[in-house]
Amino acid sequence: MLAGEDAGQVEGGADVDAGVRDAGVRGAGVREERGPQEGLPVFSEVRRPEPTQVPFRACSTALPLCVHAPNGTPGEALGEALTRSEEAMRAYDALGLPRPLPDDDRGGGPAFDVYLAPEVAPFAPRVGHDGPALGEGHDGASGFGVVALPRGRKSSGCALGSDVAYALAHGIAVRLDAGAAAGELAMVSSHLSSVVAPCPEAELVAVASFQRAPERSLLGGTLGLRDGSLLFGRYLDEAYGIGAPGAVLLGLVAIAWQQTPAGALHFRNEPDVFDALRASLQSLERHVEGTLLDFAVARAFMGSRSDGRHLSDVAWLGEAGRVRLDWSIPVGTLPRRVAPARPVAPTGATYLWLDLGGQGSDPGGNARAGSAGSAGSAGSAGSAGSTDEVTVVVDWEVPALFRWALVKVDARGAEVGRAEFGGVYGEARAQRTVVGLSGLSGLLLVGVHVGSDDRSLPFDPEHPTAARGYTAWFSR
């Protein structure tokens, strides 16, 4: 494998000789057994602090909220935490979202409890849930949050407000479905907290990590940490929402409810968020595979690559929003067969850039000295001018199903058209020829792993379908 350049934004995988057999990366494959998927443990791994550890308490007079703090906590810190908690709950109320369940006086009263702890770091709140609530008819639970104790008498900036908003969002989500998986809850909490308590310091880091590893599952987030999958929540709001931020993703959590048998150690997470998404899209005569591909394309036009035609208000992400390219290939070096450095997990995406301009530029129009693992772009400009047809053939490992899009990008870095292909059950190869390339800066090949290729198994990224690799062959 060859390492990429430009801070990891272009990463070369294997440059496979064009004479490799047509089967590419096809293999025998093994079909995975699928059974009911586990959600969170019924008994939370995060526990409430003992009352003796947090003897000080301040409760809202208007909202069901209490903040608990250890000895020696400045009054200003306690007051700030309560104020930020009230602001977040009022914002969720304004969005029409339900409040967390009452917790049967576990924190000294039924209110939602926020605990301040010196050992917790900013932007890493510890969120937990109580035992299953009785009488709900589904797996619902009350929640709580343990957040960083503000240092000194100065304001904590946006960190405290963002952390308590995250904890409250988790409390809302487990009210609706305590059986949701950790990755689902991380996505929901990250998205909702970014809506009601935006904090660039937290979101830039989360988005940068997400965009630098596009092959990762959308559900790969860690509960308690901001996750860049919040972008998928934003995409769902813009594509299918009715103007209430966060409502689509939280609605999917609500309709994916289930009831775990008594005595189980883990909640049963079936159906899950993607089951709910699949059913909801079918009612609109759409498919989850197409939605994932649309989102994967939108990810390529974020931050400094934004063209203003995909997700709104993403240009401010700057370099943090730029998705990592697996390859940037000058057209003058064709034919080429390449492979990524890393396999692609279900719901993960992959990106390859074919430079038609001969300047080694990326989709945002930024010039490069050369492409990862390639011979560079020198000398390709003259031959690029006569290129008006490119054929792409992709082969991937079974038993996966991939969908692909060839996106035409003009000299301004904007999408001007696309051709979608692949996604045929039982097939591990797809190809497409694109014509009409005059005046384009390049072609962006976008692929997304959409699960098993067995049509009898409905798409469900939480089932154990392994990450899969592929090869792509470009010719003109």
Image (spheres, grey):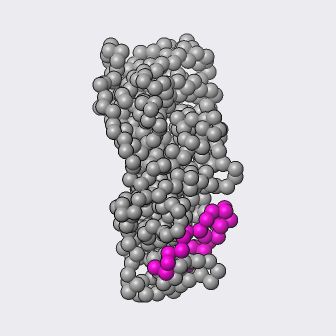
Residue 20 left/right relative to 216: left
> Front-most of 33 and 190?
33
Percent of width and height locating residue 405: 53, 28
Percent of width and height locating residue 406: 53, 26
Percent of width and height locating residue 299: 53, 40
Q: Is residue 402 above or below residue 54?
A: above
Q: Is residue 329 magenta?
A: no
User: Which residue does the image show at 54% across and 74% down from the upper left?
Assistant: 102
Q: Is residue 132 above or below residue 204?
A: below
Q: Is residue 105 magenta?
A: yes
The picture quadrant where one finds residue 336 is top left
Percent of width and height locating residue 59: 56, 83
Q: How many marks?
A: 0
Residue most extreme to the right: 242
Q: Is residue 87 above or below residue 21?
A: below
The picture quadrant where one finds residue 54 is bottom left
Question: Which segment did they paint magenta?
Answer: 82-106
